[in-house]
Structure formats: structure tokens, C-alpha cells
Image (cartoon, coloured by chain):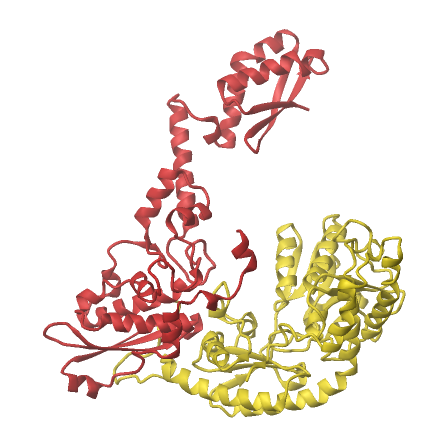
Chain colours: A yellow, B red
Amino acid sequence: MKVYLDNNATTIVDPNVFEVMEPFFVQKYGNPNSLHAFAGETHPHIKTAMTKIYAGINANTKDSVVITSCATESNNWVLKSIYFEYILTGKKNHIIISEVEHPSIMATARFIESMGCKVTYLPINSEGLITAQSVRDSITSKTALVSVMWANNETGAIFPVEEIGQICEEHNVLFHTDAVQAIGKLPVNVQSFNVDYLTFSAHKFHGPKGVGALFMKKGKELIPLLHGGSQMGGYRSGTLNVPGIVGMGKAIEQAVDALDFEMSEIREMRDDFEDALLEIPDTFVVTPRRNRTPNTILISFRGIEGESMLWDLNREGIAASTGSACASEDLEANSVMEAIGADEDLAHTAIRFSLSRYTTQEELDHTLEVVKKAVTRLREISSSYAYTPEGHESGLTAGH
Amino acid sequence: MGMDSLIGGTIWDEYSNKVADLMNNPQNMGEITEEQAQEMGGKLIVADFGAESCGDAVRLYWVVDPVSDVIISSKFKSFGCGTAIASSDTMAELCKGKTVQEAVKITNIDVEMAMRDTPDVPSVPPQKMHCSVMAYDVIKKAAGQYLNVDMESFEEEIIVCECARVTLGTLQEVIRLNDLTTVEQIADYTKAGAFCKSCIRPGGHEEKDIYLVDLLEEYEKEKMAKTADSLSQGGPVDFADMTIVQKLKAVDKVIDDNIRQMLIMDGGDMEILDIKENGEHFDIYIRYLGACNGCASSSTGTLFAIENILKEKLNNNIRVLPI
């Protein structure tokens, strides 16, 4: 049995989404900006898709929702354009982000920091959350932008974006949120609170890869990151990805339709699964469920290094994820686990299970059995659970 | 770079079958109690290395014959990834039947080689070499306990990169002989810094006493001192090797000795504003003073004379740019 529980990384493309995209590869392949029927026949479909995308986040038609190539591009765009427009020109000198942003914010912030921008990294607390107060405390008269993700990809922790948006408005600071993990999991309505920029990406909600978007509130349009043939109103040049836009439109429509299901059924399945996992001794979850996206579990199994756990899960066809040491290029511990300041022995033990509306109860039951088996086997191997003879100075050499 | 690094891929693709097999079925996993050790007629040694907070930890159990120092039994327990478990297992296997003195000669490279499917294909991806180092360290720890000496005493040379086992001496020599200036070059020449990257600069996975950047800086200073000595003794010095200050002085001296007198006779002068390295060129920015300023020859004949004399005396890649 193959079980996919890595939906925060990417999702299966919904067959309905795939179906609506298909005609735009071999049949209606025209460049929408050309002057002929091949172009013209794509226009109504783009219009329909864009209408759905606007509706998906309840954007006003006067706002701009610009289609990009991925959320990474959208996030880079916000930070770099703010840098060009406000920091480089000396109007402002400071931005604020959280310390657990996605690498596309984190690395970009570090980059503009190296170019002279001051960056405040807001800390998370022991529950993996940031407080709106910390934003208030960090804003200065020179702050150009606050960028805080809506929901964290690792823990599923939901950050108080409404409150943060309010604070930014009071201080006349621009506010961006990376909502990649929010669409399809939480209600997203850009008119219900103050937000200037919002990033999302189709492949996180059963749309195609290679299609991102950036919402920009009317009057807050950024200078372009990609210059060229003036597509997307000149905000984002590059030939329109017609099948991608059409796919994103269908995908967001379905995601919004399925939101109730996600927040009731999926949440319930997740909760039951989590309860069952927590019955395994020495097992920990960080963020409280009420502050978490309905599909995500970040769980630690004491004494089991994350990659070993993935290994055993993968042998049985189960896909999960870990940001921990040995599974990544840089050998570093899960950044969120480190930031939480949890028991440091647990920093390398976190495993993330992320569900979707395609997840079945049968799959979760099977996964639970496999997890139990893996925990038994790997704790048998683990030195954390080993026999210590009397007089042996236990305690391992830290900081080796 | 190149295609493979652009595609990326997962670290598991680079595990050998042996690593996978040992991860699935470790052969020497387990623990040994005092009673079991007594039954075998040996002394129980239990050594720990690493820490869970660092991502890997290993415990090694040995039963050692107190007369012959031969390791009769060897088992391990490990908190770690697939590579950590497989290399701990291999390490425990390699210890068996050896004397303690022989066992301390086992290195992480032996462990990694033993896990290869074919002799010339590494058994683990580069960043995983680090995990086999722990297997090597725990042997020294166990041997130190048995022989009652400090584990550091088994190291004959200072190792800077543990993954590739490159010594301080080798690194210093290679940097000097090949005039290396970047950590990438060091990795190309010695493999040091190509694996877990901890030894490149502070802030990596592991804290070190000596980093590759320190060695480069040391060499840089050494070169600088050599150039300065050579200059003060009037010896020949390549213009390119000079520091910016030395370059400025050298340029000024050539101007003083060959040009300035002529300019002053014509009621003018010049000053050097900046020297910039621009690819293979050295761009020297100057400004004319007095009568030279605006003189027709200042952008033709005089300029060529200045540039030519600097090229001749200092370096053929010099360009003079009046502002």
C-alpha cells in the first residue's frame, strides 16, 4: 500500500484540474499576446481562471493578483522590490520577518541584509507561535515591510496575521504574508483584514507545479522583478503559462469548495491519527491543535533520528517528511524544532505527516501500524534506549 | 555545478546496497551486559560518542580479552540516520578479532570503503561522510578506556577535515605549493571541506579548532609578509602580488622617477586616485593638476607615456584612466 502523507510539500493534481489543463498543450497552445485566433481562443479561459483565482482569496478586481512561476518567485519579488524601492533609496532601512519563514523568504532576507537592509527575525515561542506584540515591539519609523507567513509549513502553526496586519496599518508599514500553507486549509479573505501582499502556489492545493501568484492590493503595486514583454500588466513579464493559470483557477475553486470538508473531516481524521500516535510512549507534538492547520502533524519520537524513521516508513510505501539533520544537505537540525527551544535531544527526531482531502482512513490505519513497528525496531537500535552498565558514565559527549 | 548538481535528487539514491542492507538488518546491533562479558572471559568496555542533540550518537560495547587485548565481541547501539547505523554496524564488525591496538587504526575511511558495493563508487553521499567519523571516534574512546589513556593520544597528526582525513600538514603544503586562495580549490586538490563542510568556516555542523579559512588567511599573511620583505630589500616583486598600499607606492615611485619631473617643468602635475583590479587588468585612475589639466596631450601623448612606463616597469596589464 502506498500512502502519501507529505501534502505540505506538494499534492496530487486533482484529475479535474488536469482535465481542464489538457487542451492548452496540444490544441489551444497560442500565445495569448499574439494577434490571431490561436491567441484569441485562450482569452476567455484565462479570464475565467483569473476570476476564480480572484474569488479564491476574495480579491477586489481593482487589486492585482499576478501569476508567477512559483511561491518562491512571489516571495523574492516582494522582498527584492521593497529593497529596491525603499531600502536602496534610503527611504527606509528595515524589514521584519519571523525566524521560521520558508527559505524563499529567509534566504532572500539574508541576501538583502547583506546589501545593507536591517532585518528583525521574530522569535517563536515554545508552542511554535509568534505574537502580534513582538511585531509591534519591532516596528520602527524606518520599517518598510513586515513579512510573516500565515501558517508554518513544518508545524502547521497559524500565525496571527489579522492582528499583525492591523498593527502594520496603524504604523503605516507594508504587510506581506506567505499564505502557501493557508489556501485550502483556512479561509483566506484579503478584504477581511489589512494585507498588502499575499503569496500562494497552486501545487499546494492540488493544482500544477510551476504556478504561483502574488496578490498586491490596489495602490500598493510593487516594481517588477521580471522585466520584459510587459505581460501581466507589466508587473510580471514572461509568456503566460496558460495551462498553469487554467489549472490554478480550477484548483483554487475546488480547494475553497472543499474547505469545510478540510476543516471538519480532515481535521477529525488528523486528530484521531495524532491521538493514536501520541499513545506511543515518549512521543511529542509541539503546536496545540487549535493553532494549527487542520492537516498537519509535526511529531517527535524520542530516540529515533528523523531520517531513520523516514527510511522505515518508506520501506512500507509511506511518504512523510523531516526537516531534520541527516535528511537534508546541511546536516542541521529542524529549524523550527531548534527555534522552539524544545528539549534539544528532540531536535533531530521530528517527523511531519501532512494529510489532504485524498487521504483515507484506511491509509492512516496502515500508517499507524507501520509507525508502531518502526518505533519498536529503531528504538531497539537506538543508543538512547540502550543498556548502561553500573558505573558507566552514561551521558553522551555533547558537542562532538 | 553541472547537470547532476542542478537536478539534485535524494541522498538515498547515493547509498550503496550494503548501506541499505545494514540499515534494514544491522548485524552487530545489540548490547552486552557485565554477566555476558564475564561468561566470555573478557572485560566489558562501553563507550559513547556523539549526542542526540547533534543528530547522531553511538554506543560501542566491547568484550576484550585482558591477556591478549583481542576484542572478542563487539556490538553497537546508535541514534542516527541510515548512514550512522550502517557505519556503526560496519565499525563493530571491523573491530572483531583485532587487538585494541589494531582497532584504533581503523578509520572512518576504512568504514566507508567496507560499505562500498564496487571499489570505486562511494557508499554514501559526500555530506554523509560525517556520520562515519563518529564510528571512528567511538573506537578511540573505547580503546582509551581500555588502555586507560586519553583518546586524543591516538591521533598522531592534527586532522583538519575528519571526513576526508586530511591533516594540517598536508593542507598547509598543498595551499602553498599551488598558491590556493579559495576553499573550493582546497576541496578540489585535497577533498578537505567537500563532505560535511564543518571544517570550512565557523558556524557549521561541528565546532573545530582549525578551519580551512584560517589556513587560507595564514597563507595570505605569509605571502604578504614575503612581499613586504622582498620590497624592503629591493628585490623583485610581482606587481600582482602587492597589496593595494604597496601597489600605490610602486606606481607613485615610477611616476616620480620617470614622469613627474617633466610634468612639473610644463607647470603641471598629476595625482593617483585609485587602483582597481578589473579582471586581468589593473586600472589606475589619475587626475591631472595645474597646466596638465585640459592640455591636449593629456589624453594622448602624455597619457601613453605614463601608461607605457608603468607597463614596462610594473605590469603589462596596467591601464591608466584619467578622470
Residue A141 in view here: yes
Return the residue nearer the eye: A352 or A52.
A52
Quarter where residue A320 is shown: bottom right
Q: Position of residue A73 (x, y in %)?
A: 70, 60
Image quadrant where one finds the N terminus of chain A:
bottom right
Above or below A245: residue B248: above
Q: Is residue A377 left or right of residue A122?
A: left
Above or below A33: residue B177: above
Residue A92 in view here: no
Residue at 42% over, 48% down = B188
* Residue found at the very far top of the displayed protein: B265
Above or below A84: residue B307: above
Image quadrant where one finds the C terminus of chain A:
bottom left
Q: Is residue B49 left or right of residue A181?
A: left
Residue at 41% over, 39% down = B221
Tag count in the figure? Answer: 0
Q: Position of residue B320 (x, y in %)?
A: 61, 22
Quarter where residue A14 is shown: bottom right
Q: Position of residue A335 (x, y in %)?
A: 55, 69
Q: Position of residue A202 (x, y in %)?
A: 72, 70
Above or below B179: residue B138: below
Residue at 30% over, 47% down = B169
Q: Is residue A366 left or right of residue B267?
A: left
* Residue found at the very far front of the displayed protein: A27
